Image (cartoon, rainbow, N blue to C red):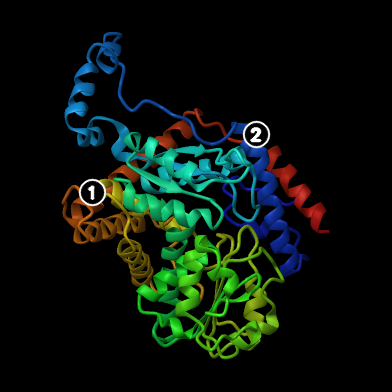
């Protein structure tokens, strides 16, 4: 057994030296899953609530509650916008899901999504200085089907208590109706991170990958594998950022999207997919190998692999090809395999490989910027502004084929992203409050650093207890046994 470090700073080093690349990749996945289970059980989840106001004597209970709090109630009654500054609403996000499309695990029942939603709340606090609550809801109707209107109604009822809503892991086609309805009818930002979030970070990675290979976004041929909420929104944002839809081909489980797909046209609830049928693939190419021949970019968000994307497909791609294999928790093709097949730049959704294209780089900064200026919605322009913010941050650090995106430990990226998104919200006319770029940046950075300092203090004082190293050893043993 190799020596384990609690920081898990070098996962590769804890496994046997004679593991192949494939064994190592599988072992890391199993280890992380096993350790996640053991530590979630150890902590009973990963989120709790704590007061942020002090108790300096027992009469302070009369200030924070009755009779003093009556002044707060009547002030908000007379001007609802005061709730953003007199309560935690202005920095509070509800992470809402019906758990019907949880990562790569599908429908996990409503409460099955709590681990992911708490994870989202965890990242919002640590990376964005945002408070968040995980709310997994039962969307079944009387007929036993998942009803998008139930989620819509729930969010509308919830709206007076939160500053923004992060929709998560809602299966298509319901996710389209839920997001598009609430974006227009709610008065706070309603953001679907699997759609706009994935779209924004993927666009950021693509911008920098194209900078490295010296190709223009409007000139490249792009193939998409997977046509769910993520990839359809990625395609939409790439088109909005200057991509040529006529040079794009998207595949779902039944073939490519094009105007001959009557099965999609006949289902109005899949309107987002039909929009892409009308815009992309004018030649109706229906074979993925043909589509990838000479292609510049492959963006896969489909079935977790490996093997979903075949090396022989990558071999057919053009010069200095770019492969995004972003299925969770296992990419459609491992980076080493894609590189061996000729890919010049490879990105995945995982942090244990180079070029992590993951929503965690986007939503903390995007939502923080929207909250600070009290935006009424997150526009597509704001998502694109976030993409360029992430891309330009990495560019300043110095791009190379293994560094096209910032990493989560680069704290400043979230503050810059918040400021860039806030400026776009003001420009788009959806902000309630106008501030300068520097004011937003400084507030975001202050909140982020205070959140981290509080977490670090609780760790130092043992209010957050260290997991027993035996848990890590147990997870490692299981991973090695499963792969050998």
**Residue at mark 1:** 373
At x 34% / y 66%, what residue is drawn? Answer: 384
Does 138 appear above or below 386? above
| Residue 284 image-quadrant placement | bottom right
x then y, percent, for residue 196: 42, 60
Number of numbered discs visible in the structure rendering: 2
63 or 479, nearer to the observer: 63
**In the rendered view, would you say 393 is above or below 246?**
above
Residue 88 at what x, y percent from top left?
31, 33
Q: Position of residue 244 (x, y in %)?
A: 41, 83
**Name of the residue lying farthest toward the top:** 58
Q: Residue at x 48, y 80 (%)?
A: 280
Q: Is residue 476 above or below residue 74?
A: below
48 relative to 252 in the view: left or right: left
**Residue under the point 36% across and 73% down:** 240
Disc 1, SS: loop
Report, in whole angstroms, how far the alpha carbon at label 2 lies from the one at label 1. 38 Å
Residue 387: image location, x then y, percent: 37, 66
Disc assigned to residue 41: 2
Q: Nearer the viewer, residue 17 or 484?
A: 484
Q: Residues within 10 Å of mark 2 (few under 14, many from 20)?
A: few
Asked whether residue 341 appears in the rendered view, the answer is no
**SS label for mark 2:** helix
Name the residue: 49% across, 37% down.
135
- Tell me the quarter of the image containing the C terminus: bottom right
The quarter holding residue 295 reads bottom right
Decide: few, some or many residues near mark 1? Use Cα within 10 Å; few <14, some 14-19, many ≥20: many
């Amino acid at each position: 057994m190799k020596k384990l470090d609690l920081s898990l700073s070098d996962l590769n080093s804890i496994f046997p030296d004679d593991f192949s690349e494939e064994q190592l990749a599988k072992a890391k996945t199993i280890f992380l899953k096993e350790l996640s289970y053991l530590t979630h059980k150890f902590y009973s989840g990963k989120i709790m609530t704590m007061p942020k106001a002090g108790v300096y004597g027992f009469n302070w209970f009369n200030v924070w509650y009755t009779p003093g709090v009556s002044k707060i109630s009547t002030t908000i009654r007379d001007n609802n916008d005061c709730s953003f500054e007199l309560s935690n609403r202005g920095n509070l996000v509800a992470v809402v899901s019906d758990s019907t499309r949880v990562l790569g695990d599908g429908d996990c029942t409503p409460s099955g999504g709590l681990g992911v939603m708490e994870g989202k709340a965890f990242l919002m606090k640590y990376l964005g200085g945002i408070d968040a609550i995980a709310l997994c809801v039962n969307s079944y109707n009387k007929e036993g089907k998942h009803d998008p209107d139930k989620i819509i109604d729930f969010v509308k009822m919830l709206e007076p208590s939160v500053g923004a809503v992060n929709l998560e892991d809602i299966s298509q086609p319901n996710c389209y109706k839920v997001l598009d309805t609430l974006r227009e009818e709610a008065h706070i930002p309603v953001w679907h991170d699997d759609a706009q979030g994935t779209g924004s970070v993927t666009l950021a990675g693509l911008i920098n990958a194209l900078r490295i290979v010296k190709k223009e976004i409007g000139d490249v041929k792009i193939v998409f594998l997977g046509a769910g909420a993520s990839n359809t929104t990625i395609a939409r944002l790439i088109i909005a950022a200057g991509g040529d839809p006529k040079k794009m081909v998207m595949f779902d489980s039944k073939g490519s999207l094009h105007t001959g797909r009557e099965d999609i046209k006949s289902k109005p609830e899949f309107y987002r997919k039909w929009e892409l049928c009308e815009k992309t693939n004018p030649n109706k190419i229906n074979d993925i190998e043909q589509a990838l021949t000479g292609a510049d970019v492959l963006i896969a968000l489909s079935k977790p692999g490996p093997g979903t994307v075949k090396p022989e497909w990558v071999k057919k791609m053009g010069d200095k090809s770019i492969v995004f294999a972003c299925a969770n928790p296992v990419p459609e093709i491992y980076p080493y395999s894609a590189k061996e097949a000729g890919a010049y730049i490879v990105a995945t959704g995982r942090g244990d490989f180079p070029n992590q294209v993951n929503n965690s780089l986007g939503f903390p900064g995007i939502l923080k910027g929207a909250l600070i200026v009290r935006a009424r919605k997150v526009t597509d322009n704001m998502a694109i502004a976030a993409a360029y913010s992430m891309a330009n941050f990495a560019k300043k650090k110095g791009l190379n084929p293994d560094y096209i995106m910032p990493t989560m430990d680069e704290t400043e990226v979230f503050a810059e992203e918040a400021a860039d998104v806030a400026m776009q919200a003001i420009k788009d006319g959806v902000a309630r409050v106008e501030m300068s770029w520097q004011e937003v940046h400084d507030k975001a950075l202050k909140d982020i650093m205070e959140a981290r300092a509080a977490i670090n203090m609780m760790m130092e004082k043992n209010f957050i207890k260290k997991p027993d190293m035996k848990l890590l050893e147990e997870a490692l043993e299981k991973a090695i046994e499963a792969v050998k």
